[in-house]
């Protein structure tokens, strides 16, 4: 999500520096993304919005990339 919008996050990445693209860093990034999707699902459930089907394909792609 930190890369999703071009707002003040641009300044963050300019200051933070280039992203680590090592295999370990890419793996960690996928884990964080899967965790975020899980949190989205829980929050939608908490709010009574059972519409999570649009996250299934994204989660499947992330999980496939982890193997």
Image (spheres, grey):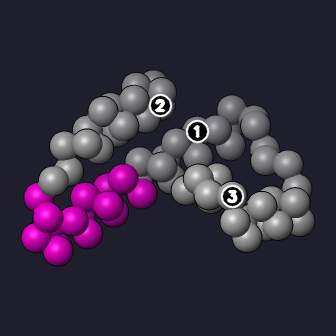
Is disc 3 surrounded by few (<14), some (14 to 19) or many (20+) residues within 10 Å? few
Q: Position of residue 61 (x, y in %)?
A: 39, 29
Could you tell me how far apart the alpha carbons at marks 3 and 2 are, in whole angstroms? 27 Å
Q: Position of residue 6 (x, y in %)?
A: 69, 58
Mark 1 or mark 3, which has the lower sequence index? Answer: 3
Q: Which residues are magenta?
A: 36-50
Residue 7 sits in quarter: bottom right
Name the residue located 52 percent from the left edge and 42 percent from the top edge.
30
Q: Position of residue 23 (x, y in %)?
A: 69, 32
Could you tell me how far apart the alpha carbons at marks 2 and 1 are, in whole angstroms? 7 Å
User: In the drawing, does residue 66 fall left or right of residue 53?
Assistant: right
Residue 37 part of the magenta-drawn span: yes
**CB of mark 3 within 8 Å of CB of mark 2?**
no
Q: Which residue ends up furthest to the front in the rendered image?
A: 7
- Main SS, magenta region, reads helix
Residue ID for mark 3? 6
User: In the drawing, does residue 3 fall left or right of residue 45?
Assistant: right
Residue ID for mark 1? 27
Badge 2 element: helix
**CB of mark 2 within 8 Å of CB of mark 1?**
yes
Q: Position of residue 67 (x, y in %)?
A: 45, 25
User: In the drawing, does residue 22 fall left or right of residue 38?
Assistant: right
Residue ID for mark 2? 66
Name the residue located 59 percent from the left edge and 53 percent from the top edge.
4
Is disc 1 surrounded by few (<14), some (14 to 19) or many (20+) residues within 10 Å? some
């Amino acid at each position: 999500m930190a890369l999703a919008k071009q707002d003040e996050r641009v300044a963050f990445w300019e200051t933070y520096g280039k992203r680590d693209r090592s295999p370990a860093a890419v793996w960690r990034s996928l884990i964080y993304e899967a965790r975020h999707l899980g949190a989205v699902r829980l929050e939608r459930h908490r709010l009574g919005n059972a519409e999570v089907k649009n996250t299934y394909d994204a989660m499947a792609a992330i999980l496939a990339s982890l193997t």
